[in-house]
Amino acid sequence: MQTRTLISPTRLNRPGAKAAYWIVLVAVIVTFTLVFVGPLYWMVTGGLKTAQETAQSPPTWWPAHPDPGNYATAWSQLSLGRLLANTVLYAAGALAFQLVFDVAAAYALSKLRPVLGNVVLAAMIGTLMIPATVLIVPQYLTVLDLPVLHANLLNTPWAIWLPSVTNAFNIFLLKRFFDAVPEELLAAGAIDGAGPIRTLWSIVLPISRPILGVVSIFAVTNVWKDFLWPLLAEADPTRQPLNVGIYSLSQNVPQNILIAALAIAAAPTVVVFLIFQRNIMSGLSAGSLKG
Amino acid sequence: MTATAAPQRSRRSTGGGAGRRTHRYSLGVQRNVTGWALLAGGVLCFVLFSWYPMIREFVLSVQQTKYGETSFVGLANYQRVVHDPAFWQAWRNTAEFTGLALLFGFALPFLIAVVLNEFRHAQGYLRVLVYLPVMLPPASALLLFKYAYDPGDGLFNSILSTFGLPTSQWLQSTTMAMPSLVLASTWMNMGGAVLIYLAALQSIPGELYEAAEIDGARLLRRFWHVTIPQCRLVLSLMLMLQVISTMQMFIEAFLLANGSGPEGATTTVVYLIYQHAFNLDDLGGASALGVLLLLVLAAFAAVYVRLDRPRG
């Protein structure tokens, strides 16, 4: 039995209400399928059509002469393999850097509380108030000529990896989770002679798996979906992630080939999402609300 | 390295029969050393890519670089960008996008969540559907929309004309360009909000609805007096987040309307910043615009927090 919502179960069980419920439900299912799956269907079948057929009005429901070769052409013409490899490289690196630096920082701020820790925390959380796009110009200049080191990080993975660490929201989520880890648990570890690092590694991290999952999803999707920053920081088309590269290379490509490329670009995350949707969605709604 | 060395040092000091005070002292030092060692990586990144750029933004906005020489110019950059006719148009466009995006992007996901929450069947399926577009790379979704918006033989006009409805110029029209961006943006981003609202709705205790019903409250009254107040916190938080994120709209205009759109109909403030910095080589102007956007959003946040507090 489900929990009570706006409309009471007894009311729904009346014959008239039952019919109305099913009509609304079916209407919503049909509408949602059309609105949210329709464009994807159009994309996948559009990639199979000939150039003339994609431009045809009214559009055909099913390609007259389906040509899977379009996908192969798109793959090589937009060098999707390289773009995908770049994206994976950036996302994996950003994830690793965030898991190491942000987890370490959140743990230090939550459990070790070194001198000036509160100031650091406030300054980190304060960056949440600064709209990200406002800082693109000075950030670009910083990456162009790193202070002290005078290194140019443009068109290197570092330009994506290092700024991704400044994810105050992830630090906030992690710190809140670590705050809730009972002190007794840590004290027990300390009595057994475990130092802070050992405690973090063998006591705190194993019980933090849910929040680490949420933070990882955020870290990866941020890189996957970011556009303006990689457009500037990875201006070299051979170094761009998928989301930017597909735009840069889309200019002189025939419509059917580009649609095939869009479908290929969409496939990895959609497939991963459909496989892990239960975990991803429960993790996201729990993490965003209670975290 | 310091981090792993620290615990050993403390253990040695306790083993060596040191006094209790020195022991506590060394524990404190150890805690601080380890703490800062763990913080170092994160803090360094924040210094380089967040805190320092923030200060630099303000400095750049009162400077001008000409022929490789940088000089202090006071508020000249601000004066120049404000007197640019594109400035006010960009703010109007940004406000229009934010307003329309709130109308659809704020109200619609909540209504969808309320309806989904009533369903005893297929809820999981519908939730996956709504969230599906969030998973696409934005460029993929937007370039697809661009084809669909084609005024000649695009999908939308084909569908409209099949049903005998009037077609539209979509992105080519000065009046429809912005709503077209909002439509694409809402489709793309709605899923996250729906998910958060659903979680909020599911945490409303059922007894509240029962009590309201016993008191004779009909459907709309229950919605108004139970659902909305119970979700108020989440609703108000999402409202603020959404205003702040839509005020920074960039990719929709950049990909769908080549940035400025017909007669500048889709030029947003962030696009103007981008243009000043990377097309006009005017870092001072771009930074001045950035500071202005920052101030407007900060003022909005301040007013919002004030209005929000007394009732909470």
Image (tube, rainbow, N blue to C red):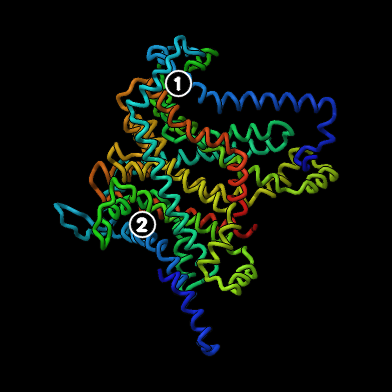
Which image quarter holds the C terminus of chain B? bottom right
Q: Position of residue A165 (x, y in %)?
A: 42, 55
- Circle number at residue B168: 1
Residue B298 in sight from this viewpoint: no
Instruction: Classify B222 as above or below B32.
Output: above
Q: Residue at x 51, y 49 (%)?
A: A216
What secondary structure is found at the residue carrying circle 2?
Answer: helix
Looking at marks 1 and 2 on the same chain, the residue that comes earlier in the sequence is marked by: 2
Instruction: Classify A67 as above or below B105.
Output: above
Q: Position of residue A245 (x, y in %)?
A: 34, 35
Furthest residue in direction top, as rendered: A64
Which image quarter holds the N terminus of chain B? bottom left
Q: Position of residue B238 (x, y in %)?
A: 56, 47
- Circle number at residue B49: 2
Type of amino acid at the residue the image marks with label 2: Phe
Q: Residue at x 26, y 61 (%)?
A: A149
The chain under label 2 reads: B
